[in-house]
Image (cartoon, rainbow, N blue to C red):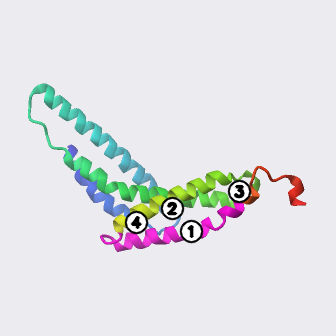
Amino acid sequence: ALSKMVTNYNTRKVTWVMGVGEEGDAVEETTAEVKRISKRLIEADALAKKFNSREVLFGVPQTDYSDVNRTSKAFEPYSAMWLAMNEFDRKRKIWMTDPFTSLDAEEIEKNVQTWWRTIFKVSKTFETTQPEIFAMAAQVKQDMEAFKTNVPIVTALRNPGMRARHWE
């Protein structure tokens, strides 16, 4: 049963990428699917360890569940990229529409830098093997860099040292 689940994850890790670029609910559905798959892979890894420990207790040869680990490692860049993209897009909408006085400049700077680093790192994984995903990551990186130009302004204007008199 576990090997069927692993085979299913190998198939699904490729198909979720096809939803990229679509608007609205597809983005949220894909993000939810990525989270579900990640959770199931963690559960599959825990089951594999549990089964192996019981096999040791019963003195039977251990089953090779290396596919679980391989699948988890193969899915990791997709998951990291998609979650960073989704979180950036979600937060950017909030930051662009919320009142300026509610923005936390340090949080914005930290998050954008973290997401940019994540996209930069995982995009290298796809550069030679999957050019269409690399192109998507490059576009997101470009969007992040464009947004990053606003961060110094937000940081300066949301500085705790700014007082009402500075605005007069």
First reached walking from the N terminus: tag 4 or tag 2? 2
Per the image, label 4 sits on a secondary structure element best described as helix
Q: How many marks?
A: 4
On the image, the x and y values in percent for residue 163 come to 84, 52
Q: Which residue is mark 2?
A: 116
Per the image, label 1 sits on a secondary structure element best described as helix
First reached walking from the N terminus: tag 2 or tag 1? 2
First reached walking from the N terminus: tag 2 or tag 3? 3
Q: Tell me what residue is drawn at x 51 percent, y 58 percent.
A: 115
- Give the magenta-colored segment's residue range: 127-155
- The crowding category of the residue bearing disc 1, from other C-alpha atoms within 10 Å (few below 14, some 14 to 19, many at least 20), is some
On the image, the x and y values in percent for residue 168 come to 91, 60
136 within the magenta span: yes
Q: Is residue 28 visible?
A: no
Q: Which residue is mark 4?
A: 123
1 and 3 marks in contact (CB < 8 Å): no
2 and 1 marks in contact (CB < 8 Å): yes
Determine whether, in the image, residue 101 is placed left or right of residue 165.
left
Residue 61 placement: quadrant: top left
Per the image, label 3 sits on a secondary structure element best described as loop
Q: Identify the amino acid type marked 4.
A: Ser
Q: Which residue is mark 1?
A: 145
Q: Tell me what residue is drawn at x 25 percent, y 52 percent.
A: 70
Q: Which mark is residue 10?
A: none
On the image, the x and y values in percent for residue 153 come to 71, 63
> How many angstroms separate mark 4 from mark 2 (CA)?
10 Å
Determine whether, in the image, residue 1 is placed left or right of residue 44.
left
Q: Is residue 31 visible?
A: yes
> How many angstroms separate mark 4 from mark 3 (CA)?
31 Å
